[in-house]
């Protein structure tokens, strides 16, 4: 087997003419300046901004509900509570935008950049994804209230199975919304985590501990959801 | 007018040092659309950080660090969410834009089998950056750089031997 002289390859690499050619003109470079970034930080920012817009739309729809059902005190009170909740969540998402790690500046260090993004995801963004999933549930609730108003002109008294169906749809909207968003972001964050593992073997332990903690929290959440669904189904069969 | 002058400076500097972008995109891309995406992202990130570039270090060194950072932090999106209509996955074919020597093509094929951070370390080594510069860019100790480099070089030699 012929020994490989990597040092000679280094010289060939440095002197490779193909890389020295000016393939991009200044005009080509300028065109890129107005392009949209596909960085994960931009993905975090877009996700939060979209949720703020969605929550604003839901808020407006609840203002409409308050006006349509102005004689129905419980609906007005619940809508007011939801509006306050929406205001708090919009503020929460807005503050989270401010915590997104900025682009590396004068001395970018690969490890620090990776750590900043991974920590932001685990410490802040994942909570925002749950807060964001609330929009789905509230959108479903407002949609149903509009449906009742335009179909019956009022909110008819609910029977227990109406609460069951409405509750199940609202919970499902929340769970599905959160699950899809988390799966999508997790796919990308895992790639960053694998780079961090590659850089620093010591980081394995801290990452593993965090992964175990997340897994435990996920299992508890799944167990609680299964318990609630089970109880609802049981109630359905007992009181049918 | 300051903005115009700054944009002009930026364009001129990036144009002059664009070989760095080509090398990093060459190493970190699997196909033509990937390469174009990465090229765009690197230039965008350079532009975003340009105002904070103090000029204490050489522009090429700073550019190398930002570009490598961008390449390593670039993540693939889940398959279902990729918009293939705008940028079809064309297989990477060096001959469509580059005419490389056999040695460089073998080196490229070998490096493409390394992990992302390994690629960064070997790239900086190929550029004759010192161990201190590599350790600063990656965020590890000089000793760790030396250990990793030995391992990467051994692995690279094994891959090249298989390829030849």
Image (spheres, coloured by chain):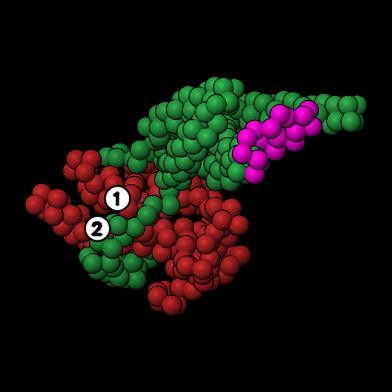
Letter of the chain shown red in the rendering:
B
Q: What residue do we see at 58% from left, 60% from top?
A: B159
Q: Quadrant of residue A191?
A: top right
Task: Judge by depth and name the residue closer to the eye, B53 or B153.
Answer: B53
Which color has been applied to chain A in this rendered view? green
User: In the image, is residue A152 part of the stretch drawn in magenta?
Assistant: yes
Q: Residues within 10 Å of mark 2 (few under 14, many from 20)?
A: many
Mark 2 lies on residue:
B14
* Mark 1 element type: helix
Q: Position of residue A142 (x, y in %)?
A: 58, 37
Residue A174 seen from this side: no
User: In the image, is residue B137 part of the stretch drawn in magenta?
Assistant: no
Reply above or below: A26 against A80. below
Q: Quadrant of the C terminus of chain A?
A: top right
Task: Judge by depth and name the residue closer to the eye, B76 or A133.
Answer: A133
Task: Judge by depth and name the residue closer to the eye, A127 or A237.
Answer: A237
Mark 1 lies on residue:
B46
> In this image, B96 relative to A3: left or right?
left
Q: Position of residue B134 (x, y in %)?
A: 38, 43
Q: Position of residue B31 (x, y in %)?
A: 50, 66
Q: What residue do we see at 34% from left, 71% from top?
A: A18
Q: Quadrant of the N terminus of chain A?
A: bottom right
Q: Which residues are magenta?
A: A151-172
Reply above or below: B132 against A13. above
């Amino acid at each position: 087997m012929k020994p490989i002289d990597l040092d000679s390859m280094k010289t060939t690499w440095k002197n490779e003419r193909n890389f020295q050619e000016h393939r991009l003109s200044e005009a080509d470079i300028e065109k890129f300046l107005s392009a949209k970034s596909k960085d994960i930080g931009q993905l975090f920012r877009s996700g939060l901004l979209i949720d703020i817009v969605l929550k604003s739309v839901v808020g407006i729809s609840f203002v409409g509900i308050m006006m349509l059902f102005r004689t129905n005190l419980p609906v007005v009170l619940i809508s007011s509570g939801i509006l306050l909740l929406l205001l708090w969540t919009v503020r929460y998402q807005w503050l989270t935008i401010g915590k997104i790690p900025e682009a590396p500046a004068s001395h970018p260090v690969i490890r620090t950049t990776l750590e900043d993004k991974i920590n932001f995801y685990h410490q802040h963004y994942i909570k925002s994804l749950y807060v964001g999933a609330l929009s789905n549930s509230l959108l479903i609730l407002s949609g149903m209230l509009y449906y009742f108003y335009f179909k019956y002109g009022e909110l008819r008294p609910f029977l227990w199975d109406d609460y069951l169906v409405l509750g199940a749809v609202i919970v499902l909207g929340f769970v599905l919304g959160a699950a899809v968003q988390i799966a999508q972001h997790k796919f990308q964050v895992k790639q960053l985590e694998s780079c961090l593992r590659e850089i620093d073997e010591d980081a394995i332990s801290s990452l593993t501990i965090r992964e175990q903690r997340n897994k435990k929290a996920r299992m508890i959440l799944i167990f609680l959801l299964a318990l609630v669904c089970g109880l609802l189904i049981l109630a359905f069969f007992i009181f049918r | 007018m300051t903005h115009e002058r700054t944009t002009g400076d930026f364009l001129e500097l990036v144009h002059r040092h664009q070989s760095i972008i080509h090398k990093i995109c060459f190493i970190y891309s699997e196909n033509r659309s990937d390469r174009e995406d990465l090229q765009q992202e690197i230039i965008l990130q350079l532009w975003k950080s340009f105002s904070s570039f103090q000029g204490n270090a050489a522009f090429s060194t700073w550019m190398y660090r930002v570009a490598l950072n961008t390449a390593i932090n670039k993540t693939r999106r889940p398959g279902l969410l990729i918009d293939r209509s705008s940028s079809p996955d064309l297989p990477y074919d060096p001959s469509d834009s580059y005419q490389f020597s056999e040695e460089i093509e073998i080196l490229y094929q070998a490096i493409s089998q390394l992990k992302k951070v390994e690629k960064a370390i070997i790239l900086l080594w190929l550029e004759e950056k010192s161990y201190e510069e590599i350790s600063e860019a990656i965020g590890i100790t000089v000793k760790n750089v030396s250990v990793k480099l030995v391992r990467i070089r051994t692995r690279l030699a094994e891959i090249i031997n298989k390829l030849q």
